Image: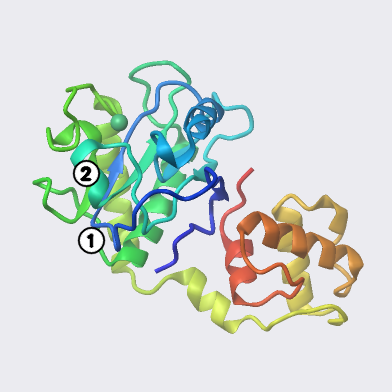
């Protein structure tokens, strides 16, 4: 099981104090009233000793972060977002720009579907709405008293509808269509390092770096030079993987996920 989603910006909250929960069995969807950056500073104030979620997804009201995914907690550790569910759930916050009741944006939906697919593949859980708090699959915060003792409305009617009608069916469709397409591509790509000559694989690498906000690479033509190596190291640092400047499976995996700002 991968513990950190390659499609997310990693935002650990300092010294880890939360216990391990093993493989989570339910992915619980929330709305956070406000903004992604505001939630981040709220979580950051008390680190893991306070409240936190595993994931957060920004909307069009978060400047430049529509569809961006941030991860605060590793998949096998506890996050304190849903009362009794904390012991076995993964939590995903979604911002609303302080406009209560708004649906998810198209980019939030796309990001939630990608994240949901990755989560099911990592945990082995099905893409279906749980019918009790002891089920396996997807749920939402206000669904059961076991997860929500204060009775607050989260993530709201419009988003629950999107979860049931868009997110769950699309993730289920992707899982039914077979193996992870990204993994199939990753397995076919060679390891590239400093000195690699121009060619089709180098064009792929340079194009993906350009798409992942590394304009310094300038063009898809060329070999594995200093500029490419620097960009690769920056990407590896961002992704929290070994920073060796060599493009192997872990680096390709990050590069192949949809561009996120
Ligand atoms: Zn909630």
Residue 165 falls in image quadrant = top left
Distance from label 2 to label 1 (Cα)? 18 Å
* Few, some or many residues within 10 Å of mark 1 (<14, 14–19, 20+): many
Question: Which of the colour schemes (rainbow, by chain, secondary structure, one colour) is used?
Answer: rainbow
Apparent side of residue 151 relative to residue 62 in the rendered image (left or right): left
Q: Residue at x 48, y 58 (%)?
A: 4
Q: Quadrant of the N terminus?
A: bottom left
Left or right position of 19 against 227: left
Check disc 1 and report the residue beneath it.
126
- Drawn side of residue 87 relative to residue 205, left or right: left
Residue 160 position within the rendered picture, expressed as x and y whole percent measured from the top left: 25, 33
Measuring from the top left, give residue 101's x and y in whole percent.
33, 19
Which residue is outermost to the top?
Answer: 99
> Which is more N-terminal, label 1 or label 2?
2
In the rendered image, which quarter is residue 76 located in?
bottom left
Question: Pointer 2: what residue?
Answer: 85
The image quadrant in which ligand 1 is located: top left
Residue at horizontal 70 percent and vertical 74 percent from the top: 247
Viewer can see residue 220: no
Query: Is 27 or 80 nearer to us in this picture?
Result: 80
Question: Measured along the vertical axis of the image, is residue 151 above or below residue 49?
Answer: above
Give SS at disc 2. helix
- In front here: 176 or 142? 142
The residue that appears at 51% across and 69% down in the rendered structure is 182
Secondary structure of the residue carrying tag 1 is: loop
Which residue is rendered at x = 24% and y = 38% of the image? Answer: 140
Q: Is residue 163 above or below residue 214?
A: above
């Amino acid at each position: 099981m991968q513990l950190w989603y390659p499609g997310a910006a990693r935002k650990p909250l300092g010294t880890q104090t939360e216990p391990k929960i093993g493989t989570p069995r339910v992915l619980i969807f929330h709305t956070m009233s406000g903004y992604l950056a505001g939630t981040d500073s709220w979580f950051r104030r008390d680190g893991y000793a306070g409240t936190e979620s595993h994931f957060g997804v920004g909307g069009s009201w978060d400047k430049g972060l529509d569809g961006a995914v941030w991860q605060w907690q590793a998949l096998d550790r506890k996050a304190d977002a849903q009362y009794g569910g904390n012991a076995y759930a993964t939590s995903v916050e979604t911002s609303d720009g302080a406009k209560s009741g708004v649906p998810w944006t198209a980019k939030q939906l796309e990001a939630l579907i990608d994240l949901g697919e990755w989560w099911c593949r990592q945990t082995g859980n099905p893409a279906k709405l749980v019918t009790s708090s002891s089920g396996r699959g997807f749920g939402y915060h206000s669904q059961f008293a076991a997860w929500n003792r204060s009775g607050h409305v989260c993530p709201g009617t419009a988003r629950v509808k999107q979860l049931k009608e868009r997110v769950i069916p699309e993730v289920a469709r992707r899982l039914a269509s077979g193996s992870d397409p990204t993994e199939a591509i990753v397995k076919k790509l060679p390891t590239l390092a400093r000195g690699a000559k121009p060619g089709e694989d180098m064009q792929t690498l340079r194009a993906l770096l350009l798409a992942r906000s590394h304009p310094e690479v300038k063009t898809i033509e060329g070999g594995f030079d200093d500029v490419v190596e620097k960009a690769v190291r920056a990407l590896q640092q961002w992704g929290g993987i070994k920073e060796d400047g060599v493009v192997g499976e872990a680096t390709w995996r990050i590069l192949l996920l949809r561009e996120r700002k």
